[in-house]
Image (spheres, rainbow, N blue to C red):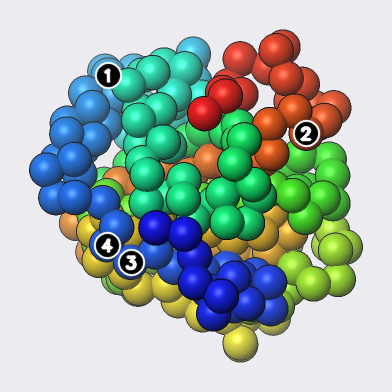
């Protein structure tokens, strides 16, 4: 279903919109089964390789068998492109970007163990080398997300300047990326049921809480853009993890 005028207004003003429980239960189960198979592969690994990134410990060293992220997940498991093409999600993104879309930078964060992390505070466009407002990032929660098991956090309105704030290399359990120092006193925790998608501007400051619960918290993340939009770091037809929808 296309976004309502109120949802579009909220997206532009606050930088995000929530599509609560938009995935059918039976399809959630089928996607979880595909992701379970990837997790099983990760638990057999002793070093990060071929898109499978192991979680760092407090010293920043990889923990054998503990999967942190699968980068390029729709290349490794092409059947997951069906999740990026879910009609309820595509209809909403098309309201913002138009009918012809691509998706790139596909990722899967298992966040299965107590203490698991996904990301610190950051802007996606920092990694993309652009400030365009024509990229809509999307996080999809196959399990429900809350403050105990690592829900998304957003800083509403932080996208409006169009500027990229400084990012510095993370340490310890966050040694896998570069993050921003922010005043999170006005941050919003996006608590949501299973099958929820959150769309947000690639300029929006966002992150995720750690999983302190020990409950599984599968989520994917990727980025929609109008078909053919130039991106120097992720060129169409060259970058493998860029897909026409």
Can residue 22 be spotted in the picture? yes
Q: Quadrant of residue 233?
A: top right
Residue 40, horizontal then vertical, whole percent = 22, 24
User: From the viewer's perspective, is 165 left or right of 80?
Assistant: right
Q: Choose between 237 and 151: the one closer to the eye.
A: 237
Q: Secondary structure at mark 1?
A: helix
Which label sits on residue 41? Answer: 1
* Residue found 39% across the figure and 58% down from its top: 1
**Residue count near mark 3 (Cα–Cα under 10 Å), binned few <14, some 14–19, many ≥20:** some
For this orientation, the residue located farthest to the bottom is 185
Q: Secondary structure at mark 4?
A: loop
Which label sits on residue 20? Answer: 3
Q: Marks 4 and 3, how far apart in space? A: 4 Å
Residue 127, horizontal then vertical, whole percent = 74, 42
The residue carrying mark 4 is 21
Residue 178, horizontal then vertical, whole percent = 70, 48
* Residue found 19% across the figure and 56% down from its top: 215
The residue carrying mark 2 is 229
Q: Are marks 4 and 3 in contact (CB under 8 Å)?
A: yes
């Amino acid at each position: 279903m296309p976004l309502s005028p109120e949802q579009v207004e909220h997206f532009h003003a606050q930088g995000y919109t929530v599509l609560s429980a938009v995935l059918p239960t039976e399809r959630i189960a089928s996607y979880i089964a595909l992701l379970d198979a990837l997790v099983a592969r990760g638990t057999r690994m002793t070093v990060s390789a071929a898109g499978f990134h192991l979680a760092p410990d407090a010293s920043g060293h990889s923990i054998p068998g503990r999967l942190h992220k699968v980068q390029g997940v729709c290349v490794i498991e092409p059947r997951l492109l069906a999740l990026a093409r879910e009609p309820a999600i595509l209809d909403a993104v098309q309201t913002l970007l138009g009918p012809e879309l691509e998706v790139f930078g596909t990722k899967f964060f298992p966040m299965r163990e107590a203490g698991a992390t996904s990301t610190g505070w950051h802007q996606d466009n920092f990694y993309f080398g652009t400030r365009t407002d024509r990229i809509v990032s999307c996080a999809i929660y196959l399990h429900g997300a809350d403050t105990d098991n690592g829900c998304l956090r957003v800083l509403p309105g932080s996208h409006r300047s169009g500027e990229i704030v400084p990012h510095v290399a993370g340490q310890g359990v966050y040694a896998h990326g570069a993050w921003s120092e922010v005043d999170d006193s006005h941050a919003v925790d996006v608590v949501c049921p299973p099958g929820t998608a959150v769309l947000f501007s690639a300029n929006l400051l966002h992150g995720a809480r750690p999983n302190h619960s020990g409950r599984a918290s599968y989520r994917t993340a990727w980025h929609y853009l109008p078909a053919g939009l130039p991106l120097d770091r992720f060129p169409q037809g060259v970058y493998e993890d860029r897909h026409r929808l």
